[in-house]
Image: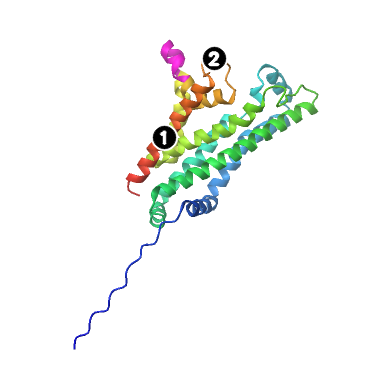
Amino acid sequence: MSMAAAPSPKRTRRPSPGLAATIASEWRKFWALASMRLIIAITMGLTVGVTLLIFLFGGGGELAAEQQGEKFGVIFIGGTLGITAFTALAATFVAVEYRSGMISCTLTATPTRWRVLAAKLLIISGLALVVGSATSFLNFAISQSVLGAMGEPTLHLVEDDLLRPVVLFLPLGMLVQSLLTAAVAVGLRNAPAAVVLVFSLNTIPVWIAGYVGDWFANTVPRRVPGATVESIAGVSTPGSGGYLDLVPAVLTLLTWLAAALVAAFSWFSRRDA
């Protein structure tokens, strides 16, 4: 009497973690990287820290004079440097796993690739808004408190129409530039190259505007991502070469972000780990 072969157990495919679980996993990886905490500290130092250093070393009188001529020059001193530093965080967070080879493990644990990239971008976005808002309000409070203690004129958020710039400029700038840099880092798989490329995108059109003709000068510089953020935040002077009305500025910025994110998700889903 022959014995029938025992049926082999069915292999059950483990479901891919959901978006919430993927975000939690990426968040743990984020804080496990010492470089992430260092970049956040550098970002704060290049904004709030620079303001404190200038006051501590006797630059209060010069800042008071500058604020009389250009009110944004003091409350956002070091702001561009802080935004640039934060883009390094975004690029590093996306590209570091390619450099270490850990991306293969990540995609094995979470085969649904879009969730991995979405989790990274959501973490970057949330941090950009939190860090940007904190540095903006801290810098405003510190600069105006010290000027007031020196007997110098100070600015007020509501009376001087500064609420919109203080609320939007640094948080929106960090959000936009970090998402663009993260998207580029997905394609290049190299954090420094992504930072340099996005920085060049924002600065080179402005630098060469005076040398390449009126059409370029009046059209391109005001439509780079950094300039659209300044227009939306109310930092640009109406009529200047970097100014766009609010609706065109928002639409231009959304176009930049949509193009970058569509490209990033396409690259991430198609390319080998």
Q: Name the residue beneath numbered marker 2.
A: 240
Mark 1: secondary structure: helix
Label 2 and label 1: CA atoms lie apart by 27 Å
Q: Nearer the viewer, residue 24 or 177?
A: 24
Q: Tell me where the magenta segment starts and ends, as one range.
A: 208-221
Is residue 251 shown to the viewer in this render? yes
Secondary structure mainly formed by the magenta segment: helix
Task: Check the picture and name the quadrant holding the N terminus.
Answer: bottom left
Q: Residue furthest bottom?
A: 1
From this viewpoint, is residue 76 visible? no
Q: Residue at 39% across / 49% down in the picture?
A: 113
Q: How many marks?
A: 2
Amino acid at dot 2: Ser
Residue at the spot 32% in from the left edge and 69% down from the top edge: 10
x, y percentage for residue 254? 47, 30
Badge 2 or badge 1: first in the primary sequence: 2
Q: Please give the label number shown on residue 260.
A: 1
171 is higher (above) or lower (below) than 155: below
Residue drawn at 45 percent across, 33 percent down: 257
Pick the front one: 130 or 103: 130
Residue 18: x and y in percent read 46, 54
Q: Is residue 135 left or right of residue 215?
A: right
Q: Which residue lies most toward the left here?
A: 1
